[in-house]
Amino acid sequence: MQHVNRFKLAALALSLAVTGAYAQDTIKIGFSGPLSGGAALYGKNVLSGMQMAADEINAKPVDIAGKRYKVEIVALDDKYNPAETGINLQRLVQQHKSAAVLVPHSGGVFAAQAANEKLKVLLLAYTSLPAATERGNKLTVRIPPDFTAYIAPFIKASMSKYGKNVALAQADHDYAKAWSAAFKPAWEAAGGKVVADNPMSYNKAADFYSGVSRVIQARPDVLFIGGASEPTALVAKQARELGFKGAFIVLDQAKLDEMAKVTGGYAALEGAVGVMPMSGDDRPEASAFTARFRKANEGKDPSSEVALNYSAVHATIAAMKLAGTVSDAAAIRARMDQAFRTLPAQYNPTSVEGLDHNGGAIVNALVATVENGKLKGQLLRAANAQ
């Protein structure tokens, strides 16, 4: 009996040793963004890209400094409220032990930057505002390109075909305010005139007739609109219903393909200029990514935020491997540029070329215009490309 017991104990010890050798620890990447309210679709798109990357990473063993890891995305709803983002950041770091936290709106990014260096956590900022990486925060990476690169081509496309009078009817959140502040002087410098300016609360309303009616009374040739895709589409749709015949300049948060689903097609968006949807990007990496996403999501098309945040998760794990750590935020941040530059093409569908000296993504973006009910694209070379 003693021999049998000794045999069982030895077998149990061997089993535990083997299990321990192949046990996986968990890398937690946090998310704080809108999962309810008017911007819920936007937040869920970001989250779906992150989760797609995590699923791919978890399909194969991830070895970092001799240990195996799986990736878990921990998502908290902040309702697009920066105050909630700050609270969520604390929870994600202190309660969930997140190695990095992704925030997909500028107000939330700035709220998180008040604490992320003190908490020693890498902030993945999904905002096109250059200020996100110009404020000196050493643990921030800006995922999308600087939005100001879009302004000149957007103005040229609209003003040359439709006219010089623009009315502003964009959202009233921080990102839209920054877009408006940069757009107005650029439009005027190009010889145009701002005939009306009426920002609206896209995240709290579904009826924009009153606000839209106010701006189109000024007889604009072009409407400057934008926030999350669904309310932006409603603004465009209601403008058409009120008789507006001109063009739309759509700030990059809103996606033309998602808007078309609300407006009943691209015909209602004739003359619109915005960022090319992923489904319209015919570059090889983008087309392959779109096909994989459709297969995994019952034919649904990915948006640019899906693709960029998918790449951000892959790059973060790659940076951890390069740095040999999953917890030293400064060491991981120091490797993020190299991680993006060496990321395999299949994990980099938007062709991020790396980070600039401030930590902002270098991306050659595609500008899209709606002409005769169809999307037409033009590649916009990044001014900071190396």
Image (cartoon, grey):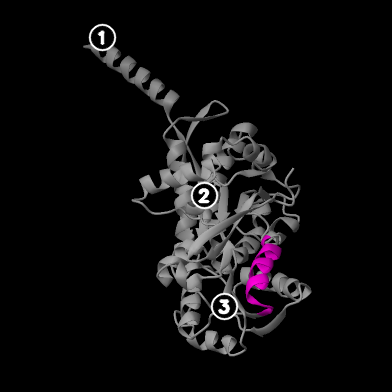
Say what amino acid the circle numbered 1 marks. Answer: His
Instruction: Give the label, 2 or 1, closer to the camera.
Output: 2
Question: Disc 3 versus disc 1: distance between alpha carbons?
Answer: 89 Å
Find out whether residue 156 is within the magenta segment: yes
Magenta-colored span: 150-165
The reply to whether dot 3 and dot 2 touch (C-beta < 8 Å) is no
Q: Residue at x 61, y 37 (%)?
A: 319
Specify the amino acid type for callout 2.
Ala
Q: Main secondary structure of the magenta part?
A: helix
Nearer to the camera, 312 or 138: 312
- Of residues 366 and 64, the one drawn nearer to the viewer in this rendering: 366
Q: Which mark is residue 3?
A: 1
Distance of mark 3 from mark 2, alpha carbons? 31 Å
Across and down, in percent, residue 325 comes to 61, 35
* Crowding at mark 1 (Cα within 10 Å: few <14, some 14-19, many 20+): few
The residue type indicated by label 3 comes to Gly
Q: Earlier in the sequence, mark 3 or mark 2?
A: 3
